[in-house]
Amino acid sequence: MNLSESQMKEIADERDQQSLTRRNTVSELEDLMFSPIPVLDHGFIRVIDYMGSDSSVVQAARVSYGKGTRRVSDDRNLIKYLLRHSHTTPFEMAEIKLHVKLPLFVARQWIRHRTANVNEYSARYSILDNEFYLPDAAHLAAQSDVNRQGRGETLNEDETNEVLELLRRDANHAYSSYLSLLNQDELGNKLDLKKTGIARELARMNISLNFYTQWYWKVDMHNFMHFLRLRADSHAQYEIRAYADVMLSIFKAWAPWSYEAFLEYRLNSVNLSQTSVEVVRRLIAGEPVSFETSRLSRREWDELALTFNLKKD
Ligand SMILES: Cc1cc2nc3c(=O)[nH]c(=O)nc-3n(C[C@H](O)[C@H](O)[C@H](O)COP(=O)(O)OP(=O)(O)OC[C@H]3O[C@@H](n4cnc5c(N)ncnc54)[C@H](O)[C@@H]3O)c2cc1C
């Protein structure tokens, strides 16, 4: 993650400013405010602002006049109860705003979450930086044989080096063509005085998906949890999961009781189909159940076996 001196100064200046407020604040999140938390090789997440926390969830649920707080244990249990019973609107009363720097292919997955407000860096207005994502060797893997949307074995050293070289070469080539199309160097000086170059909104089209973009992303806690439920899950692509993992740590600082309830009733819980529940009941009753007698599909059986450490066949 590279930040220029002026960007670091802007962040330090922002962090130095303090204002009195009657609003409810969270010191753990205040500590994180504005500082970029690195993700992948050049990306980051910064907390820019937030409104409310656990207490606003409780306050909204009780429609109370003050902070909504009774006893700590009451509030904590109320939050658990709300999430367990999918009474989610109180969680919409708290919001968070993040500044995210992320590769374009991650942004394409992220933007599918429609229930947030987004403002993206404009490559029509500004020139893109020469920053592209190169995976760590540990994350360079072959296509999975069992999951069409996943990775399998990691590559050997020779193939890893070859792949990284190809990715680096193509991205550098794309960036150098991008500057040629603009007829500019990285500092904005004209390359050829006789040429006009093409507009930024056109020149960007040859940039590859591993280049970084940036946006401000604002979301309420309910939809923040929905995002994390899908993207911090082991089925999500590693690169977006890396962002979701950082967001989990932000969530913990922001609203520790909601975070705790989220782990319990969403992220680490499982949904069971009607037939899966029947299988579990039969197993508890001591009946031997195999894939053949389970009436589940192969994939569902394998997933159930994994969840409950069952013998696979
Ligand atoms: C592992 C994984 C694999 C995926 N693979 C693919 C893929 O192959 N192809 C692909 O196109 N996408 C894929 N997606 C994206 C996925 O289909 C969703 O678009 C994405 O996860 C956003 O989820 P969402 O719509 O629930 O979120 P949001 O857009 O934030 O919506 C939140 C909720 O609001 C409600 N909502 C929002 N908009 C509407 C609407 N217009 N109508 C009705 N209800 C609405 C729904 O209840 C929704 O769940 C994948 C996602 C994951 C996590």
Image (cartoon, rainbow, N blue to C red):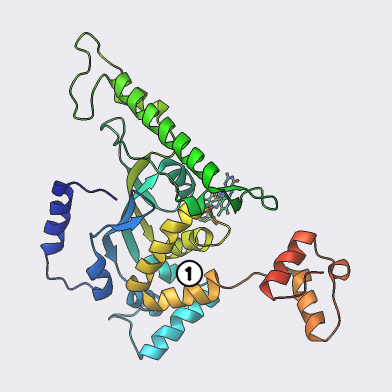
For image coordinates 38% across by 47% down, the residue present is 102
Residue 294 in view of the camera: yes
Q: Pick the residue in front: 88 or 271.
A: 271
Residue pointed to by mark 1? 88
Q: Is label 1 in a helix, a strand or a loop? A: loop
The residue type indicated by label 1 comes to: Thr
Look at 43% across and 40% down and name the residue there: 210
Which residue is rendered at x = 35% and y = 42% of the image? 213
Q: As displayed, is residue 231 above or below residue 165?
A: below
| Rendering coords of residue 56 (x, y %) | 34, 74
Residue 305, x across and y down, in percent = 73, 71
Q: Quadrant of the C terminus?
A: bottom right
Residue lying furthest top in this view?
A: 194
Seen from the viewer's position, the closer of residues 310 and 106 is 310
- 55 relative position to 78: left or right: left
Q: How many marks?
A: 1
Residue 52 picture location, percent across and down: 30, 70
- Which residue is at the front of the view, 66 or 276? 276
Residue 113 in view (yes/no)? no
Relative placement, left or right, of 248 versus 290 is left
Determine the image quadrant of residue 268.
Answer: bottom right
Q: Who's the residue at 38% across and 38% down the image?
A: 211
Q: Residues within 10 Å of mark 1 (few under 14, many from 20)?
A: some
